[in-house]
Image (spheres, rainbow, N blue to C red):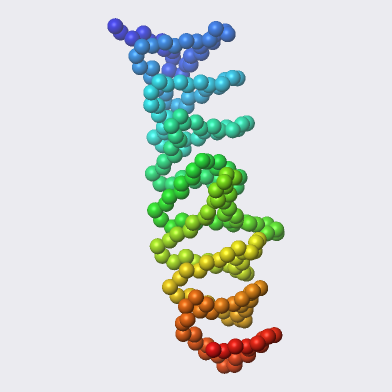
Amino acid sequence: FDANVIKSSHNNGGMDLITGTGGIDIITTGLFNIDVTQEITMDTNSYINITAVSSSEFKTTTGDFTINSNAANLILKGETGVSIDSATKIDIGTIQDKPINIDASTLYIDSSDNTNLTLTANNDNNKILTIAGSNVGNGLCNIDIDTDGILELDAGTGINIGTNANVPIDFNTSTLDIDCSGNFTLDSATNINIGGTTPISTSINTTTLDINSSQNITID
């Protein structure tokens, strides 16, 4: 059967479909195709519901594709997951700095090139970049930092370890090199043991050596 055609008789003419509260139903058992040479505008005083029973695609061949929620949140839901892919890059917060909240059961961030986690502030008050872990159950939450190269820790003013509470620190290393341009102070509330487990050779190379003790000095 030939298709039925409804058209305007004038090239510059338009077509209006106006109905009452009953609405308009378009039902077809075949393909529903809309082709226009200009823009498509859809306006409603209520909501728009588009439902498909199989995989669907919205795309543009040129230009940006914008989804804008002016008055409320933009919600993306996926029953099995949400995938965001790009052939070049993915940018978040490019127009203005806004808070980002990620609340997840598990979080994986993998990259194949140089990676930065940076806080760049412009404020007269101090800002803090915090990496914290906690376990509200019976177990603990450990933080494990590993690398097959060098682990570098730098700071502009100081590096403090164990500032909140006195806890054990264990250095297990093949060699330990501590260099300082100023004074080197080693204090303990109880004892300072050098080679306390196994007797080893100890070399002290200094211009002057000053040993002060409030009690006996024993050299064996």
Closer-to-camera residue (24/133): 133
Question: Does 127 sit above or below residue 49?
Answer: below
Q: Quadrant of residue 82?
A: top left
At 52% across and 55% down in the image, what residue appears? 143
Question: Does 70 sit above or below residue 7?
Answer: below
Closer-to-camera residue (179/170): 170
At 49% across and 75% down in the image, what residue appears? 197
> In this view, which residue lies farthest toward the bottom?
207
Residue 9 visible in the displayed image: no
**Quick check: 165 left or right of 55?**
right
Residue 26 visible in the displayed image: yes
Measuring from the top left, give residue 190's x and y in whole percent: 64, 74
Measuring from the top left, give residue 55's x and y in whole percent: 38, 26
Q: Quadrant of the N terminus?
A: top left
Q: Quadrant of residue 125?
A: bottom right
Measuring from the top left, give residue 142's x and y in whole percent: 53, 54
Question: Does 176 sit above or below residue 47?
Answer: below
Q: Quadrant of residue 56?
A: top left
At 50% across and 35% down in the image, what residue appears? 66
Question: Does 202 sit above or below residue 164?
Answer: below
**Quick check: 193 left or right of 89?**
right
Q: In this figure, what is the number of numbered marks?
A: 0
Q: Quadrant of the C terminus?
A: bottom right
Closer-to-camera residue (55/67): 55
Measuring from the top left, give residue 195's x and y in whole percent: 51, 79
**Quick check: 215 left or right of 38?**
right
At 59% across and 77% down in the image, what residue appears? 192
